Image (spheres, rainbow, N blue to C red):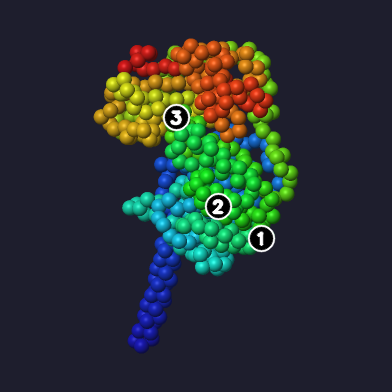
Amino acid sequence: MQRTLALIRILLFALLMTTSTTVEGNRSAMEENIRNPAVAGQFYTADANSLRKEIEGYLDETGGAPVDGDIVALVSPHAGYMYSGRVAAHGYSLIRGKHIETVVVIAPSHVEYFDFCSIFNGDAYSTPLGEIRIDREISGAIASKHDLLRHSAKGHAYSSFDRGEHSLEVQLPFLQVALGEFKLVAIVMGDQNYDNIKALGEALGEVLTGTNSLIVASTDLSHFHSDKQAKELNGAFVEVLKEFDPKKLYGALAGKRTEACGGGPTAAAMIAAEKLGATRCEILNYATSGDVTGDRSSVVGYVSAAMLRGGEAGSRGSSADKDSSAFGGAAVGDLGSGLNEQDKIHLLMLARKTIADRLGVEKAEIPDYSSPVMKEQRGGFVTLKKNGRLRGCIGYIEAVKPLEDTIREMALAAAFNDYRFPQLEKSEIDLLEIEISVLSPILEISDPSVIEVGVHGLIITRGMNRGLLLPQVATEWKWDRETFLAQTCVKAGLPEDMWSRDGTKIEVFTADVFSEEELDLR
């Protein structure tokens, strides 16, 4: 009997220990601190397959000649992908397929104030593309260097009741597609004073020495100024970046000569990059939201840049430069959209069905339709009118996606993301008239005499200044060719005769505009 009781006690003890171990293991798994995505479905799509495909498309399109030298740090924008994804891709395309063990992302805080640099104290950041594990060793080493650098959830924490910080998160899917596996050091800078900037930059320079790592500084530029004002403010930021002087950058920001929500992270990255051997910063791409929407009255600026070690300055070739002579002097005529009437009907039905689906409004399915032009990368706008008045209009000026994808995305953007209007409601959909503008491929020319007034739209670019006028503008104002060129320069904030000077880029396109009313679809 005693032996039986002893055996029972042993079995019960073993069972208790097993249960305790299992509970402890489950509790450990449950207690992992994973930062879930806060802006998936807003700043970028929440669908993993679509997200990967979209980013790969940006990288394929913008991947140009490599820079000369080792990339120590990138400067990258953090707006919604439809606005800044193409600019960001100019930097991420340069690291595509490389093996980098640890990426340090430094981002500004938009959602809460704190007076230090917050180094994420959790286990991983998650995106629709999977989890990215935190590099605990490097994170801890950075946090140990100064009392202004702290392990913390500040700037990182997110729940369904709180607004989550986007500026760090939006960099991660690009990094996942470009690099595959890597470890992350996630840093959100609270107060962007120079003490924080210096402490973080010097700590990164010390801790990252001898590591296989990359720094990414997350920043947008000026917000909601006119295109002309934005070019002045953003031009100052770009010039200081090229000077590669963090104190000058901080001084320009403090003196209000330029604007950048991530100016502090950029300056900290510059200090660190210099300590890691970088000697220069090359500008990869610049654009504004107006380049996407066509609205130049209130824009946000974006820049992509690389801080480099070794190599020669200014050695990066431009694919645009290589291709610029292809159409020089050619009789470009009407470039044409290549759309027939059935193509137009399909696109209009597609735009309406896309909006209806988002609103949860039942509409008849669109018949299967196949046309090669739908797969061509095209610029395009979707315009919504209600009772004859504008209700939303957004588009891609340049060809960044297949035409069908462009129209789907711009239909949703016009309905729900045009900041000039409230989001579309169910009750409005039957009151809408949809108009679509499909742009031809944009061609650079070297001989302005090929421009046909009333046929061609113009884009004139010089440095950071860029102006666009649609073909119908010249017709409405009864301009001749030289006046059209001069007025496009004015739109770009340039002297009227700048089109005739060396170094000015002139591009032409045509637009095919059609509506539901015109094609009797309402």
**Residue 23 position in % (x across, y down):** 40, 68
Amino acid identity at mark 3: Asp
**Residue 211 position in % (x across, y down):** 65, 59
**Residue 193 position in % (x across, y down):** 50, 57
| SS at mark 1 in the image | loop
Residue 220: assigned label: none
In the image, is residue 118 above or below residue 473? Answer: below
Q: Nearer the viewer, residue 400 or 418?
A: 418
- Residue for badge 1: 209
Sequence-first tag of 2 and 3: 2
In the image, is residue 134 above or below residue 23? Answer: above
Q: Nearer the viewer, residue 61 or 422?
A: 422
Residue drawn at x 56%, y 44% as measured from the top left: 237
> How far is mark 1 from mark 2, CA to CA?
24 Å
Specify the quadrant of the image occupied by residue 208. bottom right
**Residue 347 position in % (x across, y down):** 43, 22
In the image, is residue 395 above or below residue 46? Answer: above
Residue 250: assigned label: 2
Sequence-first tag of 3 and 1: 1
Amino acid identity at mark 1: Thr
> How far is mark 3 from mark 1, CA to CA?
45 Å
In the image, is residue 141 above or below residue 320? Answer: below
Q: Within 10 angstroms of label 3, few (less than 14), some, or many (20 or more) residues?
A: some
Q: Within 10 angstroms of label 2, few (less than 14), some, or many (20 or more) residues?
A: many
- Residue for badge 3: 295
Amino acid identity at mark 2: Tyr
Point out the frontmost of discs 3 and 1: 3
